[in-house]
Image: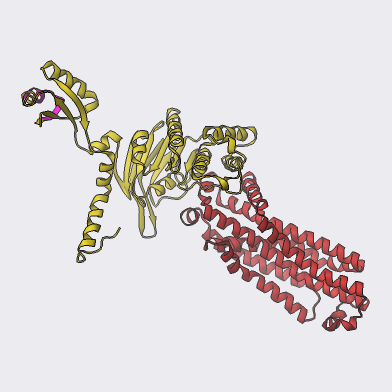
Chain colours: A red, B yellow
Amino acid sequence: MRPAYVWAVFVKEWRDLLSNRLLLGAVALPAIVFAAIPTGLVAFIQVNDLDPNQLGQIQQYIANFPGLPAKLAAQGFIVTNFMAYFLLIPAMVPMAIASQSVIGEKVARSLEPQLATPLEVPELLAGKTIAAALPAVVATWGVFVAYGLVNGAIADPRLTRLVFSDQWLVAMASLVPLICLFSVLLGIIVSSRVNDARTAQQIGGFVVIPIIAIAVAQFFGGQATFTMQQVLIGNLMVASLIGLALIVGSWAFDRETIITRLG
Amino acid sequence: MIVVEGLRKDFGRVTAVHDVSFSVGDGEIFGLLGPNGAGKTTTVRLLAGLIAPSAGSATVNGHPLGEGSQRIRALTGILTESPGLHDKLTARQNLAFYGRLYGLRGAELGRAVERYLGVVEMLPFADRRVGGFSKGMRQKIAIARALLHEPEVIYLDEPTSGLDPAAAKTVRDFVDTLRSLGRSIVICTHNLDEAERLCDRIAIMRGRLLRVDTPAGLRRHGRAATVRIELNGAGGAESFVGMLASMPSVLAAQPLSGSLVVELADPARETPDLVAALVEAGARITGVREESATLEEVYLSLVGEVGERDLRLAAVREPSVPEVAS
């Protein structure tokens, strides 16, 4: 794989992406929403100086933070429990970008001229994948850092340490890029079979279901956030799914299939 | 130089291109004519190294299809059926992107982009997004893209499609210039007039090659050329038939309504001698013209369009006639 060719595709994809305000909004909005809700709750508790006894169901989860005062433990639970939803950003955003990109190329019939150059299919896909995954990785990392710092500033620096825990640092470094990669591959594979970006996103949308299920199960199971073991198992599972997607993708995206069916 | 031998391409059970053999020399414009689905685009895709043949072989400037496909793509410029541009990018950005994919970098890339934007007269629109361009403007940018890296072999699929007459002439003139620079050029077109004007040789295909010849050769359709000589004075034509029959270049001669109809093997070379001999024999010639079928007539008869159309009409008139697959 030649970096200059991957770079050329990446730059073209970025120019395309930056000119698409709707898509940029789709990148920014989930990141802001997933961070704003728990931060708003933490601020609400802080400003109103609420008694944890008034916080209903959350009270029973305070036991997760034995060393913290009840109010801070409640805030800690909110802050860490919502972090599972951060994984929705790498699951949703790259798929939206990748499917928009591939279907855009299908509609414009611009894949054939690209493949008529010395560009190889893996270089094309690598450029597209990096361009689709990078905004989500950067957005997730940016929100993660801001989330930790802002919540620490609102309530207590100990919240920052809860956010920047070992398991979440590992999750940000490994699980987030892996989910991004899987999401891009899924977006590309689905887009190769349909002709409308919205349909592609709807079909590929099932990827968010396991993440939402995990977040909800975590809440009702009384677990504040992931353990390191769960993060590592998650890495392994997503890596396996990527392997599967690569096999399907190499079949769906060989040069001849692109030329004769996607052009 | 393109050399094609027994090329075949199957898509599942369907054979799109069947046993195609031809060659295109340096500085030659070779036309591919045929109805929709005749295999023209598939042939070009095969030769451009975009898809692999099912059988047969071809070399492009000495590089074989298959292991040499990446090199073939590097020395090939292709104007695809659809311009396939990136609407959100400007004309300059589109060309710069493709220039990079063809290995151009830095100042060389900038010069090539400027040059070809100028060649297709699109410099004033260089920094506008392609999404707002008309069909003709997009076609011009696609042509510039195909030529940006100075390819040795060029495939042009309907090069003047969507262009106004002036722009179409500019493109034709430029293709002519490329020929004079020694490039091998293959043009796929439905425009028979354009094919006749531009191409040195034309292949008519429908899955397989039906005929390959010069435009003049195709018009004769494998028969000897006929030259009609109009004479002043009725009844005189018969008196020259005997004289003409004795000339070695004349294959056959007969009088027809006061004219002489003469069959020659090579009318371009032999007609002046024929006319000179007739004048010397006392003929008063008022007109000489080569009679041949039009390229359209030859094309339609070769691809069987006329026959099929007649059959379809018959099927409409007479329900008992089995349906003809189109």
For the point 81% across and 76% down, the residue is A224
- Could you tell me residue A159's position as x and y percent? 88, 68
Picture coordinates of residue B144, whole percent (x, y):
52, 38
Question: Farthest residue toward the front?
Answer: B233
Q: Tell me the quarter of the picture where residue B314 sits.
A: bottom left
Question: Which quadrant of the figure contains the N terminus of chain B?
Answer: top left
User: How many marks on residues?
Assistant: 0
User: Does residue B194 sit above or below A187 in this rendering?
Assistant: above
Q: Is residue B195 left or right of residue B155?
A: left
Left or right: residue A147 compared with residue A203: right
Q: Hey, which quadrant is residue A151 in on the image?
A: bottom right
Outermost residue to the top? B280
| Residue B251 on the magenta segment | yes
Along the horizontal axis of the image, is A15 left or right of B56?
A: right
A4 and B78: which is toward the camera:
B78
Q: Which residues are magenta?
A: B242-253
Q: Where, by quadrant of the figure, is residue A34 drawn?
A: bottom right
> At which x and y percent is residue A103?
56, 58
* Magenta stretch holds residue B46: no
* Residue A175 appears in the figure: no
Can you see residue A138? yes
Residue at the image position 42 percent from the left and 43 percent from the top? B158
**A153 or A233: which is nearer to us?**
A153
The quadrant of the picture occupied by the C terminus of chain B is bottom left
Residue B120 image point, x, y percent: 52, 35
